[in-house]
Amino acid sequence: MKNFKRYFLAISLGLLATTAGMACGWDGDDPSFYDLFRCTKPLPNLQDQHTDESVQFWGRYAGLPADDALKDAVRYLRLQDFEDGDDETIPNLLVSTLREQGKTDGLALLQLNTELNELVESTQFWYYQKVTPEQYQEVLNKANKLKVGKDLAKRLTFLKMRILSRLNDNDAMMRLWNNDASQWEPSEIRDRMEGYVAGIYFRKGEYDKALPIYFRLRDGGSISLCVNRMLDSTSIEEAYRKDPNAMILPYILEDYANYFYHASQHDYWEQGDDDYKIWTKVTREREGVVALAEKVVAEGKAKDLQMWQTFVGFMQLITGQENLAYQTLTKAEDLPGNGSMDKLIRHYKFAASLAMTPKPEEPEKFDQYVADEIKYYKEVGSFLNEPEHGVLNGLYGQEIAKRLQAYVDQRQDPTLSFLTRYVLDSNSWELDHQTPTKQVQELQHYVKHGGDGPLGECLVRYCFLSQDFFNELIGTKLIREGNYEEAKEYLEKVSDDYLRGKGITPYLMKRQRPDTPFQRKDRSEIWDLDVSEVDNIKYQFCLQVLSMKEWLNEAKGEKKAEVAFNLADMLFQASPAGDLWAISEYSWSSADYHYNELNVQADHYLKLALDCTDDFEMKVKCHFGLAANPTPNGETYLRYEKDKKRYYICTPEGPQREAYNWLHYQTKRDSPIYESCDWLKWYVADNYEAY
């Protein structure tokens, strides 16, 4: 169970010497991150709990407040903190305080703890070092020789228990417990000692002795390791026959259901690695375990029949038996239980109903039902306690998301389909790069008028897409398409408040066209620009382009060539290849979006300038611009080859190649254009070696 596994390695009370594994078999980039079946309450983070107890103890011992400063001093102790540092070294608060107080026994104990911690830490996978038993034995020898006062005696005993667990000396650990710690008054330090005793039972396979200790200590990581060995119908039935209400049973059902669910989400789980063995096991055992759960419900001996029935319904749900799952879960609502499943049944039934054929209600009523459930998730979900909160997030991230999308897609309404995806993941990439502008305009109209029907109205309510968002997005898409007149109409409606809140605004306001046409300026970005006063840069860009196009229509000869060249440079700079890329492309660095209509138009105006000029220098600048402009496949003029540690020019095509050739044959190597442009020199060196 994932709520256990997140902190198991650091704090397992009983299995510190073995670190036999985590609660679930997968901890990577898992599309089914959440555990969807929960019937137990979350257990505490024991690592934090133990740290707090240590801070409280050392605070009392040293007369220091148990605050964050002391917590850091305890948590980040290193052996070097006990050495005499220079004047510039910041002393550890706890060490320096004990040194000032002359508490040498406390310092010695603290140093031995730190020595052990560093040995244990050095075995972790991120900087693995082999630690020998002799090294642990050396620390134990020091601990055995150490004399401490009465107030430190239990801490010293606990240190010895930790060392002995690393030495796998079970007999010595049991003697330490029986002769000493078992006589202590109840306390957390005594609990931690007993956790090691439970670990001995665990390693011997005496789970009946280990589990009661783990349950009393609420040691979720160790409970889960015991559970991992019981995920088959025979073991579950054996535990049930001994006690129909055994504390372990909810943990078994929870782990079994979630292991099975994770296995169903991956097509590579049969690889045979240790981490996937349980997935193979639970998949093989499915029919037997489900049949056992149905038998438990039929016998009626368990107090929490609702849990067993819900388990059956969940297994039916994730194996595609939605109609049967809905019936099973409906029956579960009326069975006796401990109250933890009531709210979860609601969400499992919703997931099942979305894929049912036929639906449990008439279309209009079912749409209202779907809308009510989405409302619950959006307005109530974030305030829920566990386990409902985690299950709800998991379902909406996986099963409900898939089923709801399929339910809406059946209507063949692109607007509703997009809104469903957006309400669930709030990703606007699709709108920006995959949705035609006309469809986005239709979506804006739909959202502006509040949607249609209970489901449409619900999706509009929770998409949180403002008219400012649409106007800015549509305006940007229209710029990208070269439609500046229509883009201007959308962009002038965007409010200053909206622009002020956009992260790209300081970037846009800071950037200006480079002094050198068709080149990008190498500069560090300044993000602390005051945006209390903002300019609508994209709107101003549209006005400039439209104004320059008017000048172009009026100009003639060399003046026309100059205006066309400047307009081409302006469009290039606002394209993905330019310095003002954010005017038309937020995602300029994506390989699929290095070329847009602005690049096409830049080519057009450069060719127009060439047709209008007889000036050689203007021709040089125009050919330089054609060479710098990306090709239609998105290739820019410059790439970096990591293996050879050098820049190179992508294979040019069309106008870009013609421009390179012209520059090569028509200009001299000492021309200023070569001196100012490395990539042009590199291209010539790569492609015209005979020159």
Image (spheres, helix red, strand yellow):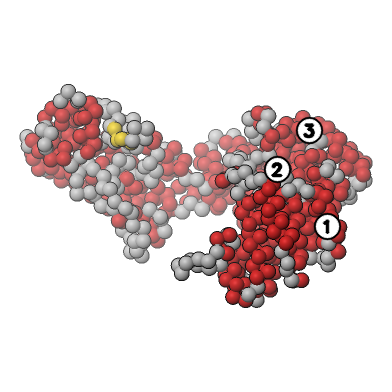
- At 57% from the left and 45% from the top, the residue drawn is 126
Residue type at mark 2? Gly
Observer able to see residue 581: yes
The residue at which mark 1 appears reads as: 177
Bin the neighbour count of mark 1 within 10 Å (Cα to Cα): few under 14, some 14-19, many 20 and up. Answer: many
Sequence-wise, which precedes: disc 1 or disc 2? 2
| Left or right of residue 417, residue 632 in this image | left
- At 79% from the left and 32% from the top, the residue drawn is 285
Q: Which mark is residue 286?
A: 3
Q: Residue 123 location, x and y as percent?
A: 62, 46
Q: Residue 647 location, x and y as percent?
A: 30, 35
**Does residue 148 lie above or below 369 as drawn?**
below
Bin the neighbour count of mark 3 within 10 Å (Cα to Cα): few under 14, some 14-19, many 20 and up. Answer: some
**Front position among marks 2 and 3:** 2
Bin the neighbour count of mark 2 within 10 Å (Cα to Cα): few under 14, some 14-19, many 20 and up. Answer: some
User: At numbered mark 3, what does the secondary structure look like: helix, strand or loop?
Assistant: helix
- At 72% from the left and 61% from the top, the residue drawn is 145
